């Protein structure tokens, strides 16, 4: 497995297209083999792995190591398969099916673990993901103590990543007490010394934390992932799903860090989607790994209809300002686009519906011919009527989930957020970006609370969506915003800096070139 690590970050394993003899293009899908136990309740084990890989577009073959009788109450029985028959399954798949990545789950005996190690030596694969399943989340023991030695001495040295939870990490380290985040950092380094190339210590069971904290160590750097804990009883199978998703992303050609991040996002989405699902009467229910197929709001809206970089210089119109300077909305929008605005929002709070629609239709034409997206503030009806590219709504407007239903998956939805809870909701409900502010005091919007640069930074750091900053931003302070150094802060939204000025074209050009200079210097 030693050559695998170098290959991981640079090459795409399986998005291979080869031309057959007859000239037809043949496609080899990315392929994960899961070597794990069957869960009769289908929340974890082989069943979870198949669903997770399938959802991520990856072919998943399966070698069953044990059949378990389990449900939401716990594990009622474990029936390991004979070693020779696990070996036979491994040979069948590995000798024929061009597996990219092997993911292991329940290995119920040292004999089965050794059979696996031997098979991997005979049929090397691109990467090995080891979920060291020893104790189920319900507390039932799924692997004996001799298997523990097998993990430590034989399997982990072959692994590209191992993903223990706190109990498993403690067991691998001879019963070390793991009670704090600092303990987790220490454990990740100690487990790395057992031989795997990367370690992810999962802190889901860490007491007294409102966040779920995982530690990823790649031998050089420790990354701490923190997300607000999702309150749900439906967590059975999170470990299996996470490891399968990492394997699936690796099979698609991701680097290890990106694979871990993508996998975490997938599990989080599944938990959110399934948090109120009721299956079984026990304390721990399954969640739905197929959620992406079931709710459009969880999938397509994060598609290709929206380029977050379009938030770079976001021009938001204001009828009063344009009137004061003697121009109409359409001329103002045209000048902003000519000056370099990358997205336009018509924010016309006082306009009559007929006037608003007329202006929106004219602006749509200009925006379309310049390939600049046009969004409408608050008015979903106007956006639908003029076929705008999307809508921007506030916390007291139509909820994002309803807007998504009305607009469908291919329109852009932005939502104003000031708090971390609002940002989390925006993501769950299907928004594409967040407008965050007011960053600085402004007279454009009355009674608006200013959150400052610290508030903006905190929201960006917690948000899974791209963010555009708004409120009192102008040439003099745009640098302090864009230099915050948070990757998902994609741009600034401005009203008065463009429209409460004599020449919209000059002001937009000036701000655009300033932003370009800032990005060039922050990238240097
Ligand atoms: C990009 C962007 N962010 C925030 C706003 C604020 O809009 P507004 O309608 O004034 O206020 P809310 O109702 O959204 O709080 C915006 N227009 N654009
Ligand atoms: C619409 C809005 N939302 C938060 S602050 C604000 C006003 C932004 O206007 P300006 O760029 O003139 O400060």
Image (tube, helix red, strand yellow):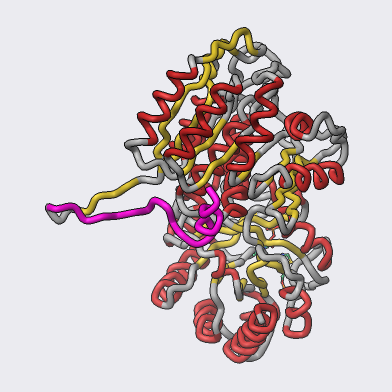
Horizontally, residue 509 falls left or right of residue 363, namely: right
Give the total number of marks visible in the rendering.
Answer: 0
Q: Is residue 421 visible?
A: no
Residue 302 visible within the image? yes
Q: Residue at x 54, y 23 (%)?
A: 112
The residue drawn where x is 60% and y is 73% is 312
Query: In the image, is residue 278 part of the stretch drawn in magenta?
Result: no
Kindly indicate the quadrant of the structure image that contains residue 497: bottom right
User: From what the image shows, is residue 288 above or below residue 225?
Assistant: above
Q: Quadrant of residue 387?
A: bottom left
Residue 2 part of the magenta-drawn span: yes
**In the displayed structure, would residue 522 be above or below residue 455?**
below
Q: Nearer the viewer, residue 46 or 303?
A: 46
Q: Regarding ligand 2, which quadrant of the image does it lie in?
A: bottom right
Bounds of the magenta span?
A: 1-21
Q: Position of residue 252 (x, y in %)?
A: 45, 50
Tell me: residue 1, above or below residue 286.
Answer: below
Q: Residue at x 62, y 83 (%)?
A: 516
| Residue at the outermost top position | 76
Q: Position of residue 483 (x, y in %)?
A: 74, 75
Q: 451 left or right of 242?
A: right
Q: Nearer the viewer, residue 490 or 223?
A: 223
């Amino acid at each position: 497995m030693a050559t695998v690590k170098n290959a991981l970050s640079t090459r795409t394993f399986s998005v291979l297209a080869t031309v057959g003899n007859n000239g037809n293009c043949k496609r080899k899908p990315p392929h994960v083999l899961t070597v794990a136990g069957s869960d009769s309740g289908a929340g974890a084990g082989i069943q979870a792995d198949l669903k997770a890989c399938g959802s991520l577009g990856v072919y998943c073959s399966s070698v069953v190591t044990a059949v378990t009788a389990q449900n939401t109450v716990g594990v009622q029985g474990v029936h390991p398969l004979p070693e020779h028959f696990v070996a036979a399954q491994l040979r069948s798949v590995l000798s024929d099916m061009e597996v990219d990545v092997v993911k292991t789950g329940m290995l119920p005996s040292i004999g089965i673990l050794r059979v696996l190690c031997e098979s991997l030596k005979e049929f090397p694969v691109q990467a090995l993901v080891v979920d060291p399943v020893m104790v189920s989340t319900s507390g039932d023991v799924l692997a004996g103590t001799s298997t523990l030695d097998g993990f430590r001495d034989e399997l982990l040295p072959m692994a590209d990543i191992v993903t223990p939870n706190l109990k498993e990490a403690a067991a691998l380290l001879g019963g070390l007490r793991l009670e704090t985040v600092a303990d987790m950092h220490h454990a990740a380094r100690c487990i790395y010394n057992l031989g795997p190339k990367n370690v992810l210590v999962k802190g889901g069971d860490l007491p007294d934390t409102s966040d779920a904290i995982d530690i990823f160590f790649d031998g050089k750097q420790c990354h701490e992932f923190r997300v607000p804990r999702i309150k749900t009883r439906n967590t059975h199978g999170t470990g299996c799903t996470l490891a399968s998703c990492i394997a699936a992303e690796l099979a698609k050609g991701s680097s290890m860090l990106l694979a871990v991040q993508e996998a975490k996002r997938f599990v989080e989405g599944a938990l959110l989607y399934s948090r109120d699902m009721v299956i079984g009467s026990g304390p721990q229910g399954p969640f739905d790994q197929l959620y992406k197929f079931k709710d459009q709001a969880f999938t397509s809206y994060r598609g290709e209809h929206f380029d977050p970089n379009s938030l770079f210089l976001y021009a938001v119109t204001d009828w009063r300002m344009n009137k004061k300077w003697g121009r109409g909305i359409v001329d103002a929008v045209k000048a902003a686009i000519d000056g370099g605005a990358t997205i336009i929002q018509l924010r016309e709070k006082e306009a009559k519906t007929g006037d608003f629609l007329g202006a929106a239709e004219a602006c749509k034409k200009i925006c379309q011919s310049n390939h600049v997206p046009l969004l409408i503030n608050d008015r979903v009806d106007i956006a639908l009527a003029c076929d705008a590219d999307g809508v921007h709504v506030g916390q007291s407007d139509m909820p994002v989930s309803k807007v998504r239903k009305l607009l469908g998956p291919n329109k852009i939805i932005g939502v104003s957020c000031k708090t971390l809870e609002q940002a989390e909701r925006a993501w769950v409900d299907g928004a594409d970006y967040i407008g965050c502010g007011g960053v600085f005091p402004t007279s454009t919007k009355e009674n608006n609370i200013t959150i400052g640069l610290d508030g903006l930074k905190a929201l960006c750091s917690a948000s899974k969506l791209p963010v555009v900053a708004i409120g009192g931003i102008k040439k003099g302070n745009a640098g302090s915003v864009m230099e915050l150094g948070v990757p998902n802060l994609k741009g600034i939204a401005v009203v008065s800096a463009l429209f409460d000025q004599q020449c919209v074209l000059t002001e937009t050009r000036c701000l655009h070139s300033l932003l370009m200079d800032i990005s060039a210097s922050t990238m240097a």
